Image: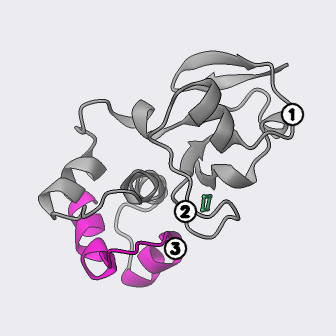
Amino acid sequence: MTRFTVNNQPVEYQLDPQTPLLWALRDASNLTGTKYGCGVGECGACTVDVDGEAVRSCQVAIGALEGTFVTTIEGLSRDRSHPVQAAFLASNLGQCGYCIPGLVMATAALLRTNRDPSDAAIAEALTNLCRCGIQPRLTEAVRRAA
Ligand code: FES
């Protein structure tokens, strides 16, 4: 059994400790806002927050998370009222939308520690991939959120 906190609720997973966090969230907790893209840590669609850090949940085994605090897009805000979500909406950032939850989580983690990120800091922190090509507008949205 693995115990930690997801979106301020204690959870106990009766799963193999090697189970990736992504699948525990999606399959066991029905938190499907966290997306599967590549499964190898490259795309960032699965980004969640673990103890204040943006983490690619496909690359973290739940057994390593005992006692941690995990926040998913559902825990950030259920009504899209988080400042990052509001800024993304105001910037018309979403197209297909698949990568947006991961980008929101990565942006929220960045702005928690850097309130005025430079273009370089944004590019370094937000390596999430988007097939729709929103990257040129992403920097503007992050600045709006900041
Ligand atoms: Fe985790 Fe792509 S699904 S980084």
Q: Answer with the quarter of the image where residue 92 lies.
A: bottom left
Q: Earlier in the sequence, mark 1 or mark 2?
A: 1
Q: Label 2 near label 3: C-beta < 8 Å?
A: yes
Does residue 49 lie above or below 135 as drawn? above
Residue 17: mark in rendering: 1
Mark 2 falls on what kind of element? loop
Task: Give percent across and percent down for residue 107.
Answer: 41, 59
- For the image shown, how many numbered marks are present on the structure? 3
Nearer the N terminus, badge 1 or badge 3? 1
Residue 36 visible to an observer of this rendering: yes
Residue 118 place in picture, x, y as percent: 38, 79
User: Which image quarter holds the N terminus?
Assistant: top right
- Residue at the image position 36 percent from the left and 60 percent from the top: 115
Cβ(mark 2) to ligand 1 < 8 Å? yes
Mark 1, other Cα within 10 Å: few <14 / some 14–19 / many ≥20:
some
In the picture, residue 87 is in which quadrant? Answer: bottom left
Residue 44: mark in rendering: 2
Ligand 1 image position (quadrant) = bottom right
Task: Say which residue appears at 83% left-offset and 39% top-offset.
Answer: 64
The residue singled out by tag 3 in the image is 127
Marks 3 and 2 sit apart, C-alpha to C-alpha, by 7 Å
Q: Tag 1: residue type? A: Pro
Region rendered in magenta: 119-146
Is 72 on the left-hand or right-hand side of 115? right
Image coordinates of residue 100 in percent, x first then y, are 36, 56
Q: CA distance from mark 1 to mark 3?
A: 28 Å
Closer to the observer: label 1 or label 3?
Answer: 1
The residue drawn where x is 79% and y is 39% is: 19
